[in-house]
Amino acid sequence: MPKGNSNVIKEAHKKVVALAYSGLCVFEFGIVSEIFGLNRPEIKGPWYSFQTVALEAGPLQAAGGLEFTASGSLSDLEQAEIIIIPGWRGKDEAVPHIICRALQGAHERGARIVSICSGIYVLAAAGLLGGRKVTTHWKYLHDFGEKYPQAILEPDSIYVDDEDIMTSAGSSAGIDLCLHIVRKDYGAKIANSVARRLVMHAHRQGGQTQYIEQPVPEEKEAHRLSGALDHIRSNLGETHSISDLANLSGMSSRSFQRKFNTLTGMPVGRWIIQERLMQARTLLETSEASIDDIAHAVGVPNVEGLRYHFRNHFGVSPGQYRKRFSV
């Protein structure tokens, strides 16, 4: 794809199928349908083609009593390049052989198999997770680990991309994984465009902790802190002292640091570095600016500092990242 502000896609569309079944988790299915199945006139060129396929006899009952039928066919499933399984109907519910066989066949021909939340039980039942890195919702981790010890659980991740097997934690993590797939297929600009339409932050790293036990800030405090967060994100190139941010939020420095950590799960300095790295990554993907200029734009004093933090966070240097992911 060209650099610049274009939302033009030149690659052919990719065929996505969502698997439907009795007891379907409708919110997680809605995530998949919204991201891959919605018409996107703002994006020029072929988008994903999307179908819903059920391998059980219908009509089916979704969670909450909704009755539905799926319009897709077995042929659609056999041609799909990406197959997504929303949350399964129960961690102790057997997965029908017809679903297992279909997923095995799809995996053998090279399709990407994706699960959201408890959908991982379907992948495991199909025998696809031996030696594979995976994650699921924190409440299923112990049960899943006992039932399928051959899988390599990454409990602190919101999603895991193990090439042709992708798994996510709870429902909101499914949104992050789906955006990650868009980003991987079509680049940061297109993924950001989809995120804007969803009115959400463009991307969370898969390795981000999915659950932090912490008190919920009072609403008025969260509102005051959100102003500071927005200010930092809008001015990443500037220096942000604790005292200035505390004054902006109408708090003492001590209270600001304590409540910031409660809200975000990390100290102020680490959060700012993370935001700077996220912006640096986007600039590496979508612009031709030099790495020195990018370091300056995101508020890192020198390129050596950017390389140090970038490698620690992403495992590669900025230059290596640009070669792999520049659009």
Image: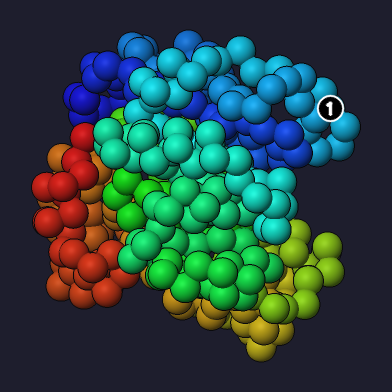
As shown in the figure, which amino acid type bears the numbered disc 1? Leu
Say if 3 sits above or below 63 in the image: above
Asked where in the image residue 147 lies, by quadrant, the reply is bottom right
Q: Residue at x 33, y 66 (%)?
A: 131
Q: Residue at x 73, y 20 (%)?
A: 58
Horizontal side, residue 209 vs residue 309: left or right? right
Q: Nearer the viewer, residue 245 or 150?
A: 150
Say if 284 sits above or below 72 in the image: below
Q: Nearer the viewer, residue 305 or 7?
A: 7
Please rate how many residues cluster around mark 1, counting C-alpha atoms within 10 Å: few if below 14, some from 14 to 19, many from 20. Answer: few
Please provide percent x and percent y for residue 111. Answer: 33, 35
Q: Quadrant of the C terminus?
A: top left
Q: Nearer the viewer, residue 48 or 237?
A: 48
Please provide percent x and percent y for residue 324. Answer: 16, 47
Asked where in the image residue 213 lies, by quadrant, the reply is bottom right
Say if 257 sits above or below 224 in the image: below
**Residue 152 visible in the picture:** yes
Horizontal side, residue 181 vs residue 314: left or right? right
Q: Residue at x 50, y 67 (%)?
A: 148
Q: Residue at x 33, y 12 (%)?
A: 45
Q: For the view shown, which residue lies furthest in the right direction?
A: 65
Say if 203 sits above or below 247 in the image: above
Horizontal side, residue 323 vs residue 150: left or right? left
Query: How many numbered discs?
Result: 1
Q: Nearer the viewer, residue 302 or 130?
A: 130
- Where disc 1 sits, the SS reads loop
Q: Which residue is mark 1?
A: 66
